[in-house]
Amino acid sequence: MQYGFGLLDYHAEQGRLVLRFPTFDFDSFGPMGDQMVQLLSATVVEKQQDADIHSWLIDFEDCQLFLKAEHYSESVWLEALIPAQSKQECDYLAALFQRGF
């Protein structure tokens, strides 16, 4: 089943993946974000919500990433906390999102 998650851009040196994500607003991001994290077999370590952005710390195979979603622009991206140590995981995620799921 396709959920509409994909890759728009990958900045490997910065450890940043800009994602294609289903349409969302501030209130609907939570369930969709949880669904994506679950599909990745990742875990949410911490969630923070500000006025216009969700910032979640997630763990993917012992790699710490921020999942960020800004609802006004409907922008969603993953950022590695330590890009130099997360290249293998980010490369894998970029390939996975490139195929779409």
Image (tube, rainbow, N blue to C red):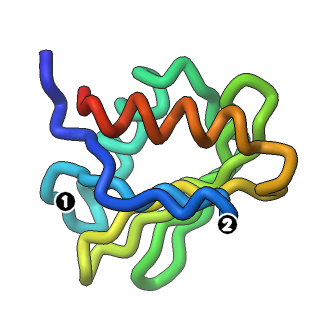
Residue 29 versus residue 36 in the image, above or below: below
The amino acid type of the residue labelled 1 equals Phe
Q: Which disc is residue 78 wearing?
A: none
Q: Is residue 58 left or right of residue 52?
A: right
Q: CA distance from mark 1 to mark 2?
A: 26 Å
Mark 1: few, some, or many residues within 10 Å (few <14, many ≥20)?
some
Residue in the picture at 14% in, 24% down: 2
Front-lying residue, 28 or 89: 89
Residue 59 image position (x, y, % from top left)? 71, 35
Residue 36 image position (x, y, % from top left)? 38, 34
Image quadrant occupied by the C terminus = top left
Residue in the picture at 24% in, 51% down: 21
Q: Is residue 85 left or right of residue 53?
A: right
Q: Secondary structure at mark 2?
A: helix
Q: Quadrant of residue 98?
A: top left
The amino acid type of the residue labelled 2 equals Gln
Residue 96 versus residue 54 in the image, above or below: above
Mark 2: few, some, or many residues within 10 Å (few <14, many ≥20)?
some
> Which residue is the site of mark 1?
24
Residue in the picture at 59% in, 26% down: 42
Q: Quadrant of residue 13?
A: bottom right
Q: Which disc is residue 14 wearing?
A: 2
Front-lying residue, 53 or 80: 80
Of marks 1 and 2, which one's residue comes earlier in the chain?
A: 2
Q: Secondary structure at mark 1?
A: loop
